[in-house]
């Protein structure tokens, strides 16, 4: 019995310590809860912070402002214009639920360009972050971060 106490108790103590240590070191901050993908939860202002795993080039930007009530959006971007001249695009967006893929967001433009180039599977939506993957190209990934304001949007007087 003495031998069991000398070997088993220290072994149990070490295992308990290791278990506690692993839990403490292995657990990062709790992840933000996923939100249901709907017009209410994506409503607001977002900044594109990653495109296909990379940050946008310095000086370029894309901001989206989703309006819940009428399911419209405004996009402010300078990717296809001069850096100091924002290009504003407006239109409507739609959220479809696909049994296999989940929520898919798509949209159109108010001008003559028609529909968005892709339909996007909303892979993740939290209060502060949203990840889209093009339905027709799994390597086309966009990550958005929620923002309080869009610095390049025209100010309302």
Image (cartoon, helix red, strand yellow):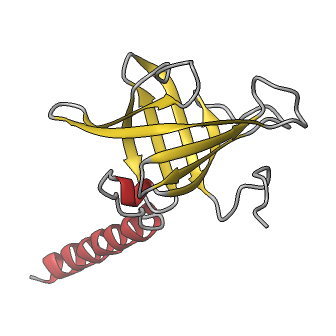
Circle count: 0
Residue at 91%, 37% in the rendered image: 84
> Which image quadrant: the N terminus?
bottom left
**Residue nearest the viewer, comparing 31 with 90:** 90
The residue at 48%/46% (across/down) is 72
Which x, y percent locates residue 19?
31, 68
Q: Quadrant of residue 11?
A: bottom left
Q: Quadrant of the C terminus?
A: bottom right
Q: Is residue 23 left or right of residue 143?
A: left
Q: Nearer the viewer, residue 36 or 57?
A: 36
* Left or right of 61 on screen, residue 63: left
Q: Is residue 41 above or below residue 110?
A: below
- Which residue ends up furthest to the left in the rendered image? 1
Answer with left or right where residue 117 lies relative to residue 46.
left
The percent position of residue 8, horizontal first and vertical second, equals 19, 74
Query: Where, by quadrant of the figure, is residue 36 drawn?
Result: bottom left
14 is higher (above) or lower (below) than 79: below
Percent position of residue 150, x then y: 71, 55
Relative vertical location of residue 108 with respect to residue 92 in this rendering, above or below: above
- x 52%, y 37%: residue: 91
Q: Is residue 34 above or below residue 100?
A: below
Residue 22 coordinates in the image, percent (x, y): 39, 64
């Amino acid at each position: 019995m003495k031998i069991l106490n000398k070997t088993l108790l220290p072994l149990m103590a070490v295992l308990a310590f290791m278990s506690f240590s692993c839990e403490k070191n292995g657990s990062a901050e709790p992840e933000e809860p996923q939100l249901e993908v709907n017009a209410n939860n994506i409503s607001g202002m977002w900044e594109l912070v990653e495109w296909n795993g990379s940050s946008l080039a310095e000086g370029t930007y894309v901001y989206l402002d989703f309006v819940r009530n009428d399911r419209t959006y405004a996009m402010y971007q300078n990717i296809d214009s001069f850096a100091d001249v924002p290009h504003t695009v407006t239109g409507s967006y739609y959220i479809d639920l696909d049994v296999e893929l989940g929520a898919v967001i798509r949209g159109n433009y108010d001008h003559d360009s028609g529909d968005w180039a892709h339909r996007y599977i909303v892979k993740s939506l939290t209060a502060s972050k949203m990840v889209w993957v093009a339905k027709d190209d799994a390597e086309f990934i966009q990550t958005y971060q929620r923002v309080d304001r869009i610095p390049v949007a025209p100010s309302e007087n």
